[in-house]
């Protein structure tokens, strides 16, 4: 066990030390405010204070872990070997930055509580993030800092055997629209037909009626292919189904359609099923509760995992609604228009509520790639190279790569050409050295 001496043991301090030491590095951690306990401890130990006590392993502490609420912090980003960091703490510290304070800033999403302009969907824009501004969005900096901390501990305690973790993947299948043409109802089908005619999309009109007449498969119905891929992998995919009411933003099939309900059940036989909360459910706990209850009725089990439509988050209220409904895993944290690490990590972490100053039971699985972000790259080669770079970044810290692909990403539409191969690259990355 690593024993940490600090004059004040706060909720913030316990949260971030347990995340870095236990959840990332696999080291149990304890805390004390008594010097004699630190001296008597015969294993890993360190002080986290303003002044070093003696010649012990020492990290000079920043004030953020001993504060409450939000303040206007002075953050100076500096280069640190092959990465970047902030909260520089001088040469007397065993490592030159307070990585625990910096990690807390990243994982609590402190910057998202600060004043900023939201995008058209009410989301925190990547352009306002430290990672984007200072060009470290492409790195899981929290995990990199944790490994640097581990290496420094190894040098101080050479006889201690540090545990190892293994690279893994967390595959998400997002289903906002299960079918493109089928099971949409008479009014929507007529509306789609008139739209095709009015915009001279006669090829789509032809395809629409081939599907409706049963002469061709719906282009978004890729679920047999997804299930076959699932059968090749021991770890189950997370499949999120949108079952909310039809709206400007959400256009899935109604859950009153038996074929849609049957599809959810079939996919649930192979994959884990979660709720894709509709656009309006994100802000309305009553709608969210209704959608949760409806999906639980379909899958006949308790629902514990969710993801928001349009990856919309409003901290801390969105996450509080999930906790109130006993949803304990969320896959919304990430950028839809950028590949990288919004929270600076490739490890799941618990949501820390900065208003209430408590660690919550909600586990955040931040995603690092949404398929739409790959559309920014013109060629298949460019897409593959960018994906490979992401995999490499996560593998360097033995983290978990979380990717989101939609069911229609595997269709034969021109814009999604090659995405089956990209998805397979993710699955096969666990077999590589």
Image (cartoon, rainbow, N blue to C red):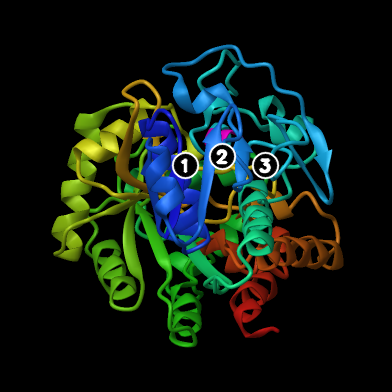
Region rendered in magenta: 100-104
Decide if residue 106 is in sight here.
yes
Residue 302 image position (x, y, % from top left): 17, 58
| The C terminus - image quarter | bottom right
Residue density around tag 2, few if under 14, some if 14–19, many if 20 or more, within 10 Å: many
Horizontal side, residue 15 vs residue 370: left or right: left
- Residue assigned mark 1: 16
- The CA span between labels 1 and 3 is 28 Å
**Which marked residue is nearer to the observer: mark 3 or mark 2?**
2
Secondary element at tag 1: helix
Q: Secondary structure at mark 2?
A: helix
Which residue carries the number 2 mark? 100
SS category of the residue bearing label 3: loop
Which one is in front, 32 or 230? 32
Q: CA distance from mark 2 to mark 1?
A: 6 Å
Which numbered disc, 2 or 1, marks the residue that appears first in the sequence? 1
Q: Are marks 2 and 1 in contact (CB under 8 Å)?
A: yes
Instruction: Give the dominant element type of the magenta stretch: helix, strand or loop.
Output: helix
Mark 3: few/some/many CA within 10 Å (<14, 14-19, 20+): some
Question: Total number of numbered labels?
Answer: 3
Question: What residue is drawn where x is 47% and y is 42%?
Answer: 16
Q: Are marks 3 and 2 in contact (CB under 8 Å)?
A: no
Is residue 185 something one can see in this rendering? no
Picture coordinates of residue 151, whole percent (x, y): 68, 61
Residue assigned mark 3? 337
* Quadrant of the rendered image containing residue 421: bottom right
The percent coordinates of residue 2 (x first, y second) are: 46, 55
Q: For residue 130: magenta?
A: no
């Amino acid at each position: 066990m690593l024993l940490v001496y600090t004059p004040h043991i706060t909720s913030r301090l316990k949260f971030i030390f347990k995340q870095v030491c236990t959840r990332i590095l696999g080291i149990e951690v304890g805390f004390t405010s008594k010097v004699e306990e630190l001296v008597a401890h015969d294993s890993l130990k360190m002080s986290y204070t303003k002044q070093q006590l003696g010649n012990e392993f020492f990290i000079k502490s920043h004030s953020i872990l001993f504060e409450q609420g939000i303040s206007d912090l002075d953050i100076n980003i500096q280069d640190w070997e092959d990465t970047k960091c902030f909260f520089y703490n001088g040469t007397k510290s065993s490592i030159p930055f307070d990585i625990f304070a910096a990690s807390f800033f990243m994982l609590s999403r402190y910057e998202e509580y600060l004043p900023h302009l939201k995008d058209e969907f009410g989301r925190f824009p990547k352009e306002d993030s430290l990672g984007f501004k200072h060009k470290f969005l492409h790195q899981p900096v929290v995990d990199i800092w944790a490994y640097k901390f581990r290496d420094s501990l190894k040098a101080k305690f050479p006889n201690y055997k540090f545990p190892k973790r293994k690279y893994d993947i967390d595959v998400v299948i997002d289903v906002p629209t299960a079918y493109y043409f089928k099971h949409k109802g008479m009014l929507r089908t007529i509306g789609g037909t008139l739209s095709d005619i009015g915009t001279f999309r006669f090829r789509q009109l032809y395809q629409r009626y081939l599907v409706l007449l049963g002469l061709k498969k719906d282009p978004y119905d890729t679920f047999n292919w997804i299930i076959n891929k699932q059968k090749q992998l021991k770890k189950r995919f997370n499949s999120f189904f949108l079952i909310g009411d039809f709206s400007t933003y959400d256009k899935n099939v109604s859950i009153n359609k038996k074929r849609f309900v049957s599809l959810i059940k079939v996919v649930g036989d192979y994959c884990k099923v979660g709720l894709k909360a509709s656009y309006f459910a994100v802000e309305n706990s009553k709608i969210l509760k209704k959608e949760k209850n409806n999906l639980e009725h379909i899958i006949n089990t308790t629902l514990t995992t969710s993801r928001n439509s349009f990856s919309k988050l409003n901290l801390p209220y969105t996450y509080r609604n999930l906790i109130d409904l006993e949803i304990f895993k969320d896959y919304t944290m990430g950028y839809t228009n950028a590949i990288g690490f919004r929270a600076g990590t490739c490890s799941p972490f618990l949501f820390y509520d900065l208003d209430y100053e408590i660690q919550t039971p909600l586990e955040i699985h931040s995603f690092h790639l949404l398929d739409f972000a790959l559309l920014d790259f013109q060629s298949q080669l460019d897409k593959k190279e960018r994906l490979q770079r992401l995999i490499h970044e996560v593998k360097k810290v033995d983290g978990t790569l979380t990717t989101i692909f939609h069911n229609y990403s595997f269709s034969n539409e021109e814009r999604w050409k090659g995405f089956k191969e990209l998805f397979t690259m993710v699955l096969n990355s666990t077999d590589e050295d």
